[in-house]
Amino acid sequence: MSIARCSLGVFAVLMAIIGQSIAWASDDLWLLERPAIRSDGRTQTVPFEYQPLSRAQKAWNLCILYPHLKDDYWLSVNYGMYVEAKRLGVSFILNEAGGYPNETRQMEQLIHCAQSDADAIVLGTVTFDGHLAEVQQASKRKPIIAVVNDIDAEGIVAKSAVSWIEMGAAAGRFLAERHPAGAPEAGVAWFPGPSGAGWVDFIDQGFRQAIAESSVKIHGTYHGDTGREEQILLVEQALGENSSVNYLVGSGPMAEVAVSILRARGLTNEIGIVSTYMSHGVFRALQRGRILAAPTDFAVLQGRLAIEMSVRALEKNLKVPVAGPAIILMTPENIGKMRSEDSLAPAAFTPVFAWQGARSEYSR
């Protein structure tokens, strides 16, 4: 987030918070960003103070779809949704597709949600436009709110998300500042994520734009699903193919497994690791100095916002249709100031697939 874009009121709040800990949510105020059109027609993000609802008007039922629950990122989104559903007094059923290649499975789940007695659908999509016809059809029955992963806006009433272009750019800028134009070349093995997933194209675009004028060069691009097993194979492949790699850069699971692989090969001090998003393992590795940098997009808060937006959509009170937290780059130097509750689920948390708002217990 550019400080130049902050209003004075929000800027003062942000500086007060960052001085103690980096946290974007309290019980009655969330610090978010939303897109705005500049006078030259370009889009920029503008920070603002968001007042969440205190309670839903009725016990709405939500049908939620995720790409997967293979890594800590979506577990943290799930935690945020559970917290907010409990706070507002609404219920949900969650389905996950099992991974980004499973576009057909998620399409079937979307159709099922549309035909169910749910009041709204919250969609963490596996594809940017592969569900377009199904989304348009489902939107005739109930509102659809997108969460985290970007999706074609047709049929979507709200988005709780950040710019994945900016997530990739944040990682790229970190390296570009270390290796500006004219400096010796720094080779990167690049792991943007699963080929075909909408967010991957955006994160790849942002990263490449950020390093374009630097001495950072991509020596190999390795696409793959974000499960740990596949990322282990990809990291091993990259190290076998590239003897001149200085950095491994990519998804949270890649960064997590890379720490162990580099240690086993005796390369911890030879090759740096940069993650393109935050996870529990990335957080711990940042604390130990094993990962050099990772932007956080406050996954817990994005989950909370998606549930809150769903209630607003159902109650005809949706004032901000697109918003998300500000992206902050974390390093070993500032990781101690990050309040993890806004980004990461508690260590003991396990996925909540069904929650009944009127009850005091939830189903795992």
Image: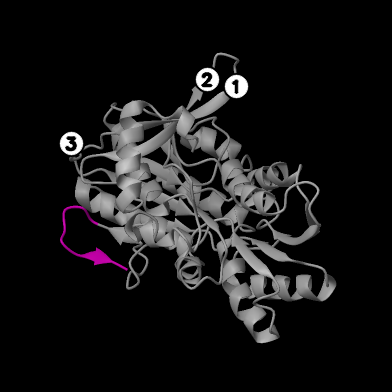
> Which tag is nearer the camera, tag 3 or tag 1?
1
Query: Given contact means CB atoms under 8 Å apart, are the residues at marks 2 and 1 in contact?
Result: yes
Q: How is the image coloured?
A: one colour
Q: Earlier in the sequence, mark 3 or mark 1?
A: 1
For disc 3, the marked residue is 57
Q: What's the residue at 46%, 49% (across, down)?
A: 297
Callout 1: helix, strand or loop? loop
For disc 1, the marked residue is 42
Instruction: Specify few, some or many for label 2: CA neighbours under 10 Å numbering under 14, 14-19, or 20 or more.
Output: few
> Which tag is nearer the camera, tag 2 or tag 3?
2
Q: What's the residue at 47%, 37% (across, down)?
A: 138
Q: Residue 37 carries which label?
A: 2
The segment highlighted magenta reads: 356-364
Query: In this rendering, is residue 357 above or below 14?
Result: below
Instruction: Specify few, some or many for label 1: CA neighbours under 10 Å numbering under 14, 14-19, or 20 or more.
Output: few
Q: Residue 313, image x and y in percent?
A: 33, 32
Of the residues shown, which amino acid type is indicated by label 1? Arg
Q: Residue 140, image x and y in percent?
A: 45, 30
Q: Earlier in the sequence, mark 2 or mark 1?
A: 2
Work out how far the residue at label 2 is from the one at label 3, CA to CA, in angstroms: 33 Å
